[in-house]
């Protein structure tokens, strides 16, 4: 795409027709305040921008009814005209596919319809979609020819910016459009890989949904959740449930418990029905044991007294043993005395035994244990309300009703997505293998872009950084430098002249890459607004460094020549310099559009 005419229909019925040549540097030059800079915004507006910012309301728009651009694409001439922005409805558009310039435009097409037609002209079909979304661009939204227009416009303020390369980059929508389609603009992403990446992104989202369903899938009980809750509550009240933890039980847990209850044939099978009787029986046994222990403890003193008396009665045995020399023994008498002595020692040991190993201590510990268990069981028995104890007939009726209700429940079984997940993973793996080589090509493309920038800057050397190596920062959209072993960010490289050189070098290198790779959706023109700006002082006079402008102008002239073998390229230069300036320097690709805007002559023609 190259522009052949910039058209302005004035309110006084004068048509301003600025004719441009293809494959040339078309210079629109003149004094400040003559409307030159509005041309960049007019071109963007006519190419269906949603913004008209940059068109001077006071000096231009108030005198205009319609704007228009006529351009050549695919060997066809097209014309787009838009209503002036000061009018109430600036959404009106005129379009002619034959490029016929009307005497006065009239609305004949909707903007969305025209965008679709222009997408077709730029080789962008509906299958080309944004693979990755953002804050203003949805994932899967269609690519538009509008996304590539920012690569063709360098405003005056942008040209000397130390922070960014692109016009209106502070607009998040424009920034995301550039980010999402940059690889397309330099040919490292083509229609096929773009479609593949979009498909991978769609599959990954589908996979995430299936994996979530797989992890959260469970049996569902369509339209029966309330009935299950009610039956579970009744079942608990009747004592048919062992525990009730409503906050922890799912509908599936409760339904399974109810199914178990519905299968009971006899009350003895139901754990909770006879629980109170079981607890009372256990309590009785524990209390009986405690009673025996208490009786033993009470009688322990009498027991010790009886042992003492028994020990005293055996003192005769001790006497006989100590005076055995004075007594005549037979074997039977000796055995009797020995036995009596042994019994006396055992009795003495039992009477004198103390501490934790003593019989009485162990008995008291057992007593405490029994008392604790008795209290626990008594508390559980107290939880039973004798007035709520259901009759056997009530329980049997409920179990019969429960069985009938369970048979009515419609269960939607748990879903298994394993096969679907595996299938999608295989698809993603297969598609990803086709983009792996493309990722390598992307890296190669950035290296090529850097080489192109470096080559241009050898003819436009940066002051103070003559031997630095330029490095395009893709994420921040800046050109930084590697200089003397360290990184110099774009913001740190100094003068307005250096920033102008960086911008010109970057955009020429970008379009060189696009033209060499024949990127259909990249327009073949570049608008540059006043590259001479750094060389004028604040009072409008030329600075001592004005000759540095020559390097940039010679580079533009050379670029036109180099692009002829790649289908040609057009530059629209908005300037202050006189025509004599480029004629003296024999810039053969430069040509003056219309005539210089000097004194009372400007973009808007005021009839005298």
Image: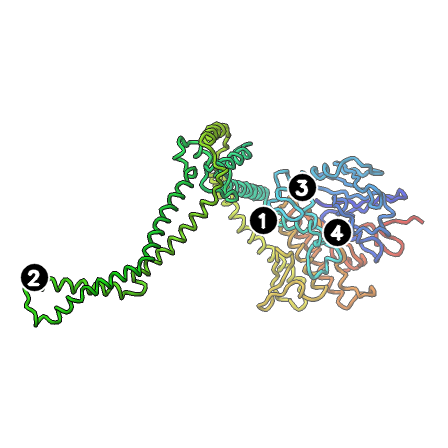
Relative to the observer, which residue lies in front, 160 or 205?
A: 205
Mark 1: secondary structure: loop
* Residue shown at 52% from the left, 44% from the top: 247
User: Pointers 3 and 4 in contact (CB under 8 A)?
Assistant: no
Of badges 4 and 1, the one in the foreground is 1
Vertical arrangement, residue 133 with respect to residue 580, above or below: above
Distance, label 2 to label 4, CA atoms, is 144 Å
Distance, label 1 to label 3, CA atoms, is 17 Å
- The residue that label 1 is drawn on is 188
Rendered location of residue 268, percent (x, y):
39, 35
- The residue that label 3 is drawn on is 122
Of badges 2 and 4, the one in the foreground is 2
Q: Earlier in the sequence, mark 2 or mark 4?
A: 2
Q: Earlier in the sequence, mark 2 or mark 3?
A: 3
Q: Earlier in the sequence, mark 4 or mark 1?
A: 1
- The residue that label 2 is drawn on is 332
Relative to the observer, which residue lies in front, 261 or 357?
A: 357
User: Pointers 1 and 3 in contact (CB under 8 A)?
Assistant: no
Vertical arrangement, residue 337 with respect to residue 178, above or below: below
Q: Earlier in the sequence, mark 1 or mark 2?
A: 1
Question: Is disc 4 surrounded by few (<14), some (14 to 19) or many (20+) residues within 10 Å?
Answer: many
- The answer to whether residue 33 is left or right of residue 157 is right
Rendered location of residue 315, percent (x, y):
18, 67
Of badges 1 and 2, the one in the foreground is 2
Q: In the rendered image, which quarter is residue 347 located in?
A: bottom left
Q: In the rendered image, which quarter is residue 109 located in?
A: top right
User: Pointers 1 and 2 in contact (CB under 8 A)?
Assistant: no
Q: Earlier in the sequence, mark 1 or mark 3?
A: 3
Q: Earlier in the sequence, mark 3 or mark 4?
A: 3
Distance, label 3 to label 4, CA atoms, is 21 Å
Of badges 3 and 4, the one in the foreground is 3
């Amino acid at each position: 795409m190259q522009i052949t005419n910039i058209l302005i229909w004035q309110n006084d019925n004068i048509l301003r027709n600025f004719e441009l040549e293809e494959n040339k540097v078309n210079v629109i030059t003149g004094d400040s305040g003559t409307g030159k800079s509005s041309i960049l915004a007019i071109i963007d507006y006519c190419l269906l921008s949603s913004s008209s910012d940059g068109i001077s309301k006071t000096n231009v728009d108030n005198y205009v009814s319609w704007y228009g651009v006529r351009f050549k694409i695919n060997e066809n001439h097209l014309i787009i005209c838009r209503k002036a922005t000061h009018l109430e409805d600036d959404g009106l558009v005129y379009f002619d596919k034959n490029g016929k310039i009307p005497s006065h435009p009239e609305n004949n097409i909707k903007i969305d319809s025209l965008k679709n037609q222009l997408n077709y002209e730029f080789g962008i079909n509906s299958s080309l979609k944004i693979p990755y979304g953002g804050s203003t661009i949805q994932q899967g939204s269609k690519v538009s020819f509008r996304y590539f227009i920012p690569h063709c416009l360098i405003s005056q303020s942008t040209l000397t910016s130390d922070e960014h390369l692109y016009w209106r980059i502070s607009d998040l929508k424009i920034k995301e459009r550039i980010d999402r389609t940059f690889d397309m603009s330099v040919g490292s992403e083509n229609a096929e890989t773009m479609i593949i990446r979009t498909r991978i992104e769609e599959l990954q989202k589908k996979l995430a949904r299936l994996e979530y369903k797989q992890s959260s899938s469970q049996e569902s009980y369509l339209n029966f959740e309330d009935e299950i809750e009610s039956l579970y509550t009744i079942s608990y009240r009747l004592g048919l449930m062992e525990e009730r933890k409503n906050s922890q039980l799912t509908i599936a847990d409760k339904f399974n418990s109810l199914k178990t209850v519905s299968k009971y044939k006899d009350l003895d099978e139901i754990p909770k029905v006879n629980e109170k009787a079981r607890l009372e029986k256990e309590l009785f046994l524990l209390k009986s044991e405690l009673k025996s222990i208490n009786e033993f403890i009470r009688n322990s003193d009498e027991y010790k007294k009886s042992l003492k008396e028994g020990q005293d009665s055996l003192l005769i045995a001790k006497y006989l043993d100590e005076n055995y020399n004075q007594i005549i023994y037979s074997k039977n008498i000796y055995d009797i005395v020995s036995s009596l002595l042994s019994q006396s020692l055992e009795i003495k040991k039992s009477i004198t035994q103390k501490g934790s190993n003593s019989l009485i201590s162990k008995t008291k510990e057992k007593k405490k244990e029994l008392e604790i268990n008795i209290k626990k069981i008594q508390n559980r028995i107290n939880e039973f309300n004798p007035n709520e104890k259901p009759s056997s007939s009530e329980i049997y009726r409920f179990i019969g009703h429960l069985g009938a209700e369970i048979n009515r429940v419609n269960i939607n079984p748990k879903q298994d997505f394993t096969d679907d997940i595996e299938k999608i993973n295989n698809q993603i793996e297969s598609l990803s293998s086709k983009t792996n080589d493309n990722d390598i090509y992307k890296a190669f493309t950035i290296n090529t872009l850097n080489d192109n920038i470096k080559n241009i800057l050898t003819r436009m050397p940066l002051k103070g950084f003559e031997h630095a190596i330029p490095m395009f920062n893709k994420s921040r959209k800046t050109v930084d430098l590697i200089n003397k072993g360290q990184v110099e960010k774009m913001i740190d490289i100094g003068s307005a002249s250096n920033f102008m050189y960086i911008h010109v070098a970057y955009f020429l290198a970008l379009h060189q890459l696009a033209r060499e790779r024949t990127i259909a959706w990249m327009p073949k023109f570049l608008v540059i607004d006043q590259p001479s700006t750094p060389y004028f002082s604040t009072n409008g006079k030329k600075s001592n460094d004005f000759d540095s402008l020559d390097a940039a102008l010679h580079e533009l002239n050379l670029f036109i020549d180099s692009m002829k073998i790649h289908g040609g390229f057009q530059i629209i230069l908005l300037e202050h310099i006189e025509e004599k300036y480029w004629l003296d320097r024999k810039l053969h690709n430069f040509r003056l559009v219309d005539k210089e805007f000097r004194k009372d002559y400007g973009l808007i023609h005021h009839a005298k």
